[in-house]
Amino acid sequence: MNSEEIKNRMDYLVNEINRNDRLYYVEARPQIPDAEYDRMYEELIRLEKEHPEFKDPNSPTLRVSGEPIEGFVQVHHSPPMKSLDKCYEKGELIQFDSFLRREMASSIKWNYVVEPKVDGVSMSLLYENRVLVRAATRGNGEVGDDVTQNVRTIRSIPKTLPEDAPELLEVRGEVFMTRDGFVKLNAALDESGRETFMNPRNACAGSLKLLDPKIVSTRPLDMVVYNAGGVGCEKFSTHAEMIEAFKRWGFSVAPFSRIVPTIEEAIEAIDELGNKRHDFRFEIDGAVLKVNERELYNSLGATAHSPRWARAYKYAPERAETLLRDITVQVGRTGVLTPVAELESVELAGSVISRATLHNAEQIAAQDIRIGDHVWVVKAGDVIPAIDGVLVEKRSSDSKPYVFPSVCPVCGSEVVKFEGEVALRCVNPACPAQLQRRLEHFASRNALDIKALGGRLSDILVEKKIVTDPLDLFSLDYAALQDLDIGEEGSPRKFGKNALNMMKAVEAAKSLPLERWLFAFGIPNVGVTVARDIAAEHKALSDLVKSPVLENVILNDTKKGKEHKILQIKVEAAKAVLAFFDGEYGLKVLERLNALGINPKSSEKEIVKTTGPLVGMGCVLTGSLSRPRTEWAKLIELAGGIVQSSVTSKTRYLIAGANVGAAKTEKAKALGTEVIDELRLKELLGMTGEDSKGDITPEEPTPKKKTAPLIQGELLGL
Ligand code: AMP
Ligand code: ZN
């Protein structure tokens, strides 16, 4: 391609990606498979790297690759981004209607719009020449923060506008976090030992404040627009018309909207919305009632606080009274004690609730919550039930303040409060509750994926002290495991055949890549992503001990001498990993893994061998070969080659075994690939003259014959 063609190709990709983003995120009707989208995205990234001079300053790739910003620049809003007057009773809505009647001549007629009040973060978007140039938070209404880099990562927000949009346009709306996304985010944060968010709005605000757009891009944020800003919307005489134009220009708008002529019908619409309030992807904290006729806005004007042509109606928070039967304390993987309210079952916002979180000891003390109290339960952020106060008048005279346990409820050892933390922790490394959680984590899907360990088995293994450390899984006695009774009280049941599956999974775990193992250890601050990032920089587990790469992360951060949020996370993770492998337990882990012959390797492709006869050459294996394909693949990789699944223009050799069709080899030749046989491959690998002793690893490891993983030395002996 010449440079003009490259530029055209890049423009085409930018447009296609933007168009498909809109189809996917705004219109929810994707037209291409995800893989195809990813391919275009990858190609664009590659072209932008090779030809930075053609990079579009609004490229969709900026969604993820923006550099961390130092802080936020302030933005002045003109006109200011106002709040809304709120009301809580239907009567106040009638009063609002009367107020409008008094304000306006009797000949003037208007309609009402009813929309959901989206509970997120108010945002202004500015487009110049139909290109998104600035996104700013409301701040105090007059001055907000420029969060453009972060907002760019929100895929449903158009980065460019179609031709019929005004050249200069400011729109306003709400950035929010989806409810599903919030639950998942919290689970992931929790899993990696970090603090969770109280509700989707906090999570949204917190995400927008992050200094690293890369992290923001992983947060499930979205936006709807519902207001004109300072410029570009003057020509719309009604709100409804304006919303229609927003839609045409590619924005998402609120999924519920009613236009009605009277306040009575508006109230009906507000009730209808109230009934649906839990069905939206986002949280709503009320309804917004607006005059539809924008030409009336000027004469109605605004107060310092809010426009006089709109009202927010807040639905009564859904809460229910119930009895707090007990407070139980759970012990997490890292020993954190979490109190849980055990409630008399009660229905709330469409679901039956019997437990609620109490967060920590301080919350219980602050609210003076006592066992036996009648309490209000609410859905915090409409997702997680929480206690919202005590009905003190119903308290019995002999009730006593709740005393948080000073020892672990499971192992009985004393609990500790670390500096700067609210949580109390059990620090006994042998605590069965922690071991239980750690074992679950160790075997979880993103860790070593040992499914058979789920449910009863892990309880029993811990209970019977068969497992006192997750690594004990690697020295289980297969016969004993088969005979293990996993039945409930009084109905014995043997683990039996499942033992084989479990041993297989354990065996397979031995060769899982570094990132999975690193995650499996459950080191604080090391979630799936962090584990992957760290693994990408290291070849093998043993390289993590006193890793200069990790030490460098810490060094660089202190040099900066500044509070730097993103790096801080990484620094904490780096510190935690270094501390783990430097600590008594970590060293024991390494020793045991060594004895077991396990040294997990990074799966990252970055770690490509730079020497060897096949360096950088793509190889495809096909047909029936004299050795298992996985074995050839390993040999090729050790020689620096890259094993591919199908022939591409980058394939150097097609290694054809017996029974390979001519069509396949012809096609390869057409792409410039050399077709060779096994013998030639052996020559290339310098394996001529070897015999069957090169049989390195059986395809399917069996539990009886303990198979050592592939060891470098054996290969070198080939
Ligand atoms: P508050 O922040 O409680 O004072 O309420 C006012 C805010 O509600 C506005 O600044 C907007 O950010 C937000 N809001 C959410 N949905 C809407 C909507 N449909 N129309 C107008 N404002 C809305
Ligand atoms: Zn304990």
Image (spheres, rainbow, N blue to C red):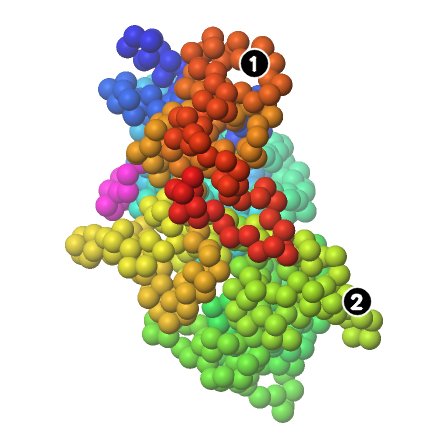
Task: Look at the image and say whether residue 69 sits in the magenta stretch.
Answer: yes
In the picture, residue 110 is in which quadrant? top right
Q: Residue at x 52, y 69 (%)?
A: 469
Where in the figure is residue 604, as x and y percent of width and height? 40, 40
Secondary structure type for disc 1: helix
Magenta span: predominant SS is loop
Whether disc 2's CB lies below 8 Å from ligand 2 is answered no
Q: How many marks?
A: 2
Mark 1 and mark 2: span between their CA atoms? 53 Å
User: For mark 2, what is the residue?
Assistant: 493
Task: Look at the image and say whether residue 295 sits in the magenta stretch.
Answer: no
Mark positioned earlier in the residue sequence (1 or 2): 2
Residue range in magenta is 66-77
Q: Does residue 291 appear anywhere in the picture?
A: no
Q: Residue at x 63, y 66 (%)?
A: 477
Q: Amino acid at mark 2?
A: Arg
Where in the figure is residue 51, as x and y percent of width and height? 27, 20
Where in the figure is residue 150, as x and y percent of width and height? 36, 39
Question: Quadrant where the N terminus lies?
Answer: top left
User: For mark 1, what is the residue?
Assistant: 664
Q: Badge 2: how crowded within 10 Å, few (<14), some, or many (20+)?
A: few
Query: Could you tell me if the residues under marks 1 and 2 are in contact, i.e. CB atoms within 8 Å?
Result: no
- Residue 361 as seen in the image, left or right of residue 210: right
Residue 520 against residue 136 in the figure, above or below: below
Front residue (pair 712, 233): 712
